[in-house]
């Protein structure tokens, strides 16, 4: 049995509330896209391309991924968890773009429908996340995983909990 190795690096994810606490979600993600703030280490782990500046807009974010052998499950295709991770990133960040400074979110629910397999050497795919609804307490978004021709590989929906600072008494 032959073995392969993979080495990668990632930026220090040091979270500094003093540096980012004044940024809206959109400003924060745009700063990451410009390289002014560190991206999340999960991107380097999976080989995801961070969104380009023009792909981080209010209510919409796009991540990219080129399927690789290290994404494989035991049956020789990209593991469903990789699909789920890139889609969760896109839909969660789309919600984040709609949040004011000091407001955070977390995924409450993620549903993914898998349509067709991704294979190493296949096309690069884009996870496109778009907001459906934002209320005071929840955000709902949908995502599509497509190639450059628009072929659908998976789609997802999410509900996120919006975490606002507690009100002073």
Image (spheres, rainbow, N blue to C red):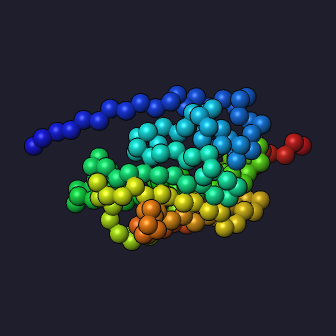
Residue drawn at point x = 73 percent, y = 59 percent:
137
Q: Is residue 33 in view?
A: yes
Q: Residue at position x 63%, y 58% from top?
A: 60
Relative vertical location of residue 121 with respect to residue 145 in this rendering, above or below: above
Q: Along the horizontal axis of the image, is 154 left or right of 20?
A: left
Is 153 located above or below residue 93 in the figure?
Answer: below
Quadrant where the N terminus lies? Answer: top left
Task: Name the quadrant containing residue 79.
Answer: bottom left
Residue 116 place in picture, x, y as percent: 35, 69
Q: Residue at x 40, y 43 (%)?
A: 47
**Residue at the far front in the pictured view:** 149
Could you say where residue 167 lies in the image, as x and y percent from the top left?
84, 46
Q: Residue furthest right?
A: 169
Foreground pick, 72 / 68: 68
Rendered-image quadrant of the C terminus: top right
What is the x, y in percent for residue 61? 60, 54
Question: Residue 168: which quarter of the image?
Answer: top right
Q: Is residue 162 visible?
A: no
- Viewer-side residue, 71 vs 160: 71
Where is residue 55 shown, x and y percent of the image?
60, 52
| Residue at image location 77% in from the left, 59% down from the top | 136
Numbered label tally: 0
């Amino acid at each position: 049995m032959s073995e392969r190795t993979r080495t990668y690096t990632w930026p220090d994810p040091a979270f500094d509330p003093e540096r980012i606490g004044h940024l809206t979600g959109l400003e924060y993600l745009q700063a990451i896209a410009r390289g002014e703030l560190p991206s999340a280490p999960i991107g380097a782990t999976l080989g995801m391309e961070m969104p380009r500046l023009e792909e981080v807009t209010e209510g919409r974010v796009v991540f990219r991924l080129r399927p690789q052998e290290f994404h494989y499950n035991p049956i020789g295709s990209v593991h469903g968890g990789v699909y789920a991770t890139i889609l969760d990133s896109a839909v969660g960040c789309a919600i984040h773009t709609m949040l004011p400074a000091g407001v955070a979110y977390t995924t409450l629910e993620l549903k993914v429908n898998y349509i067709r397999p991704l294979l190493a050497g296949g096309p690069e795919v884009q996870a496109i996340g778009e907001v459906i609804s934002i209320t005071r307490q929840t955000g709902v978004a949908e995502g599509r995983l497509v190639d450059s021709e628009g072929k659908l590989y998976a789609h997802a929906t999410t509900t996120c909990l919006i975490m606002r600072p507690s009100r002073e008494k």
